[in-house]
Image (cartoon, rainbow, N blue to C red):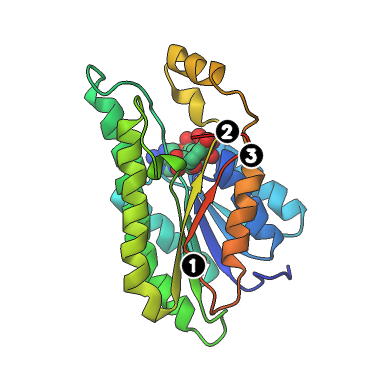
């Protein structure tokens, strides 16, 4: 498949739904070969079929990114299959809202495990390949690490303290990595979406989900809106790095 990302290999975490699924589709539509990571293998298989039906190439890599060895093996499988890795989108995440006091420790442990340690596991395994792709003569002369944070990575709210902890962390990590990797031509982009219509809120306690949805007096974005932003960042010329993108639905205030 030809396109602005023809010849590039991308890996997207959390590709079984929402923003990750839309990003897998969108990168494939630009000609990238895509490795799709998440735990739900059936969803990934469906997306592979969809991408292939459009003339693209994709691989389902079922994986729990909180398991360091599994995350490392998933990155290695991608490179073994496609020979290189040019773009990584760290998108998998979990948002378990609710007041911190009195909440089970498992909720915050879970968010930290996925949003922080899972992201680190994938990044640690992938970075040597991104550096190699950026230096390769047959590549774009640049590689991309895209980390999906949130507006919650710029502004914390009551009931979202631990989620904010993880997403502020992603912003800080991204800036540190940006400085470490700039000389090696790996661009680091942090994307901070506002509300997007996905399965993210399905994992909330019903009373918390109802409270959030009742207070939402605007239309959330579609996952494809955020995917477009990620495509924008990853298709700039080699000397242009879009380091931070805050993107809200038009009507969202906070
Ligand atoms: P979804 O719930 O639709 O997607 C989350 C994805 O993460 C799923 O594909 C899920 O797949 C994957 N995932 C969860 N845990 C793991 C794990 N342990 N290992 C591998 N994959 C995992 O929500 P979104 O698309 O909304 O979320 C994507 C990102 O966007 C998250 O980081 C979220 O914090 C962020 N975000 C979302 C916003 C929104 O309003 N929706 C706003 C701001 C940021 P599976 O269950 O199959 O493993």
Q: Upstream in the sequence, badge 3 or badge 1? A: 1
Q: Would residue 57 appear left or right of 184 to someone viewing this image?
A: right
Position of 241 relative to 18 (above/below) = below
Q: In which quarter of the image is the N terminus?
A: bottom right
Tell me the CA gap for discs 2 and 3: 17 Å
Q: Which residue lies furthest to the top in this view?
A: 207
Q: Upstream in the sequence, badge 2 or badge 1? A: 1
**Quarter of the rendering containing residue 240:** bottom right
Q: Is mark 2 within 8 Å of ligand 1?
A: yes
Q: Would residue 78 appear left or right of 33 to someone viewing this image?
A: left
Tell me the CA gap for discs 3 and 1: 27 Å
Residue drawn at the location 56% of the way across and 80% of the way down: 139
Q: Would residue 160 appear left or right of 49 to someone viewing this image?
A: left
Q: Is residue 72 visible?
A: no
Secondary structure of the residue carrying numbered label 3 = loop
Residue 178 horizontal/vertical position (percent): 37, 68
Residue drawn at the location 54% of the way across and 45% of the way down: 15
Residue 250 horizontal/vertical position (percent): 63, 39
Secondary structure of the residue carrying numbered label 2 = loop
Please tell me how crowded label 1 is: few (under 14), some (14-19), or many (20+) other residues with Cα within 10 Å: many
Q: In the rendered image, which residue does mark 2 sit on?
A: 198
Q: Do the residues labelled 2 and 3 touch (CB within 8 Å)?
A: no
Tell me the CA gap for discs 2 and 1: 24 Å
Q: Would residue 176 appear left or right of 199 to someone viewing this image?
A: left
Please tell me how crowded label 3 is: few (under 14), some (14-19), or many (20+) other residues with Cα within 10 Å: few
Q: In the rendered image, which residue does mark 1 sit on?
A: 144
């Amino acid at each position: 498949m030809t396109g602005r990302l023809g010849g590039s290999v991308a890996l997207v975490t959390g590709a079984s739904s929402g923003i990750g699924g839309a990003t897998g589709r969108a990168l494939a539509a630009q000609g990238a070969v895509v490795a799709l990571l998440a735990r739900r293998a059936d969803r990934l298989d469906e997306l592979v079929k969809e991408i292939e039906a459009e003339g693209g190439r994709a691989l389902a890599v079922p994986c729990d990114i909180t398991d360091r060895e599994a995350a490392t093996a998933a990155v290695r499988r991608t490179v073994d299959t496609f020979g290189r890795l040019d773009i990584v989108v760290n998108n998998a995440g979990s948002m378990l809202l609710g007041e911190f006091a009195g909440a089970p420790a498992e909720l915050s442990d879970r968010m930290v495990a996925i949003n922080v340690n899972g992201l680190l596991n994938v990044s640690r395994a992938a970075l040597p390949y991104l550096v190699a792709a950026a230096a390769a003569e047959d590549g774009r002369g640049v590689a991309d690490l895209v980390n999906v944070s949130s507006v919650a990575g710029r502004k914390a709210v009551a009931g979202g303290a631990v989620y904010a902890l993880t997403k502020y962390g992603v912003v800080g990590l991204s800036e540190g990595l940006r400085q470490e990797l700039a000389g090696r031509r790996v661009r680091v982009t942090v994307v901070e979406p506002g509300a997007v219509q996905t399965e993210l809120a399905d994992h909330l306690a019903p009373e918390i989900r109802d409270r959030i949805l009742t207070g939402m007096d605007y239309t959330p974005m579609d996952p494809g809106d955020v995917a477009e932003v990620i495509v924008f960042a990853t298709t700039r010329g080699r000397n242009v790095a879009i380091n931070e993108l805050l993107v809200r639905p038009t009507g969202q205030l906070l």
